[in-house]
Every structure is written in C-alpha cells, then in structure tokens.
Image: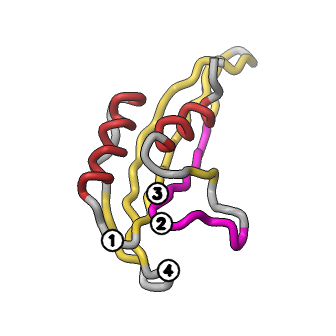
Amino acid sequence: MPSAKERIVSAVSEHVPCAHLCWPQANAPDLPWAVYLDEPSGKGADNVNWATVHGWSVELYEKYPSTELEDAVFDTLRGEYGYVEPPTTTWIDSEGCYCTLYRFSEIERT
C-alpha cells in the first residue's frame, strides 16, 4: 500500500511535477509545478496511537492561470480524498507567478 506522501505525489503528478515543500535550489522545473505540505496530528487513547490526521496543502504555481489545469487538479484531489476546500488563487509578485492553494484532510489508520 502506498504511503500518504506517495499517494499525494501520485495524484498531483498526473497533472504537474510535484515536490514536498520546495524544489532543490536551481532545480525547479519550468512552471507549472506544485509543492505539498502536511501538518499531521495524532489520535489515540490508552497510550496507543490509532490514527494520523493529515492536514494537506497543495500549492499549484503557474506563470499564467489555467482554469482547465486548476479544475483538473481539484477534481483529481476530490476523487482521491473526498472533500477539498474551494481553492484560492493569488498573484505572488516576488515570484512573478500565480499560486492556487488546495486544502483538505484525511485520517490514516496507524
């Protein structure tokens, strides 16, 4: 069974290259590409961990906005994870590109 990180990379990589947090310095591919972040927390009782709650964020970076690409990533994430918050897109002046943010969570039994 693939790990949680392998699943998210596989889902996003259907559309664009994807990395955890950032690309190695001077090795980022040409736009568009994505990065993801996980903010996990544990659940358990009686000194036993029984689940990890993953708080995923996927950031899609584009030189020019493409609703077709943004919708395709959104649909793939919804198909894999269920509920995904409505994405938000912002212009990042310092980077000269757009960023579309997708947020969702999942519970992984441990």
| Comes first in the chain, label 1 or label 2 | 2
What are the residue bounds of the magenta stretch? 25-41
| Comes first in the chain, label 4 or label 3 | 3
* Distance Cα–Cα, label 4 vs label 3: 13 Å
Residue at x 48% of width, y 50% of height: 57
Residue bearing mark 4: 95
Foreground: disc 1 or disc 3: 1
Residue bearing mark 2: 31
Determine whether 42 is above or below 21 in the image: above
Residue at x 39% of width, y 37% of height: 77
- Label 1: few (<14), some or many (≥20) within 10 Å? few
Question: Colour mode?
Answer: secondary structure
- Label 4: few (<14), some or many (≥20) within 10 Å? few
Magenta stretch: residue 31 in it?
A: yes
Q: Quadrant of the N terminus?
A: top right
Q: Secondary structure at mark 2?
A: loop
Residue at x 55% of width, y 31% of height: 7
| Comes first in the chain, label 3 or label 2 | 2
Determine whether 71 is above or below 27 in the image: above
Residue at x 50% of width, y 56% of height: 34
Proximity of marks 1 and 4: CB atoms separated by less than 8 Å: no
Residue bearing mark 3: 59
Q: Tag 1: residue type?
A: Tyr
